[in-house]
Image (cartoon, rainbow, N blue to C red):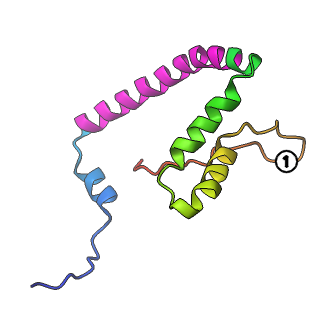
Amino acid sequence: MPSRVRSSAPSTCTTSRSRRSPRSKERLIQYLERFAQDLVTLGGRIALPIGELEERGRVEPLLRLAAARESADAAPGDAGHAERTAYEKWAPRPPASAGSPPYTSPTTFAWCP
């Protein structure tokens, strides 16, 4: 059985980036521009129903449901802690006060520019 040797080759991200044709890069840029525009457009449409849910006090149960689903795969003895941690991530943050940094999402995405 051959042994595995760590390659000094660039990461997959870098390698695949350098192999793309200019046409496929342009298509990707166009797709991302459309995606960003759709996200901006839909953001306003999504914000209105969320605002209505907040006014009716209906957000809290939805946040608890999201936290429960997110923590569903936790170990049985750790389920309660996992759900509380997930809820804290989903729960609304108070507005940033002067001098404190603004809230940023705990979710980060890695991608190849």
Q: Give residue 46's quadrant in the image.
A: top right
- Horizontal relation, residue 110 to residue 15: left or right: right
Q: What residue type is labelled 1?
A: Ser
- Who is closer to the viewer here, 52 or 12? 52
Residue located at (76% from left, 17% from top) = 55
The residue located at (43%, 26%) in the rendering is 35
Residue bounds of the magenta highlight: 23-51
Image quarter for residue 21?
top left
Residue 104 painted magenta: no
User: Is residue 32 a member of the stretch shown in magenta?
Assistant: yes
Q: What element carries label 1?
A: loop
* Front one among 43 and 49: 49
Q: Which residue lies furthest to the right in this view?
A: 98
Q: Is the magenta stretch mostly helix, strand or loop?
A: helix
Q: Where is residue 65 in the image (x, y as percent from the top left)?
A: 58, 36
Check disc 1: other Cα within 10 Å, few if <14, some if 14-19, many if 20+.
few
Report the residue at 27% width, 71% height from top. 9
From the top left corner, tell me how far across and down residue 82 is, in percent: 60, 55
Image coords of residue 87 (percent x, y): 66, 44
Q: Name the residue under label 1.
A: 100
Residue in front for this viewpoint, 13 or 105? 105
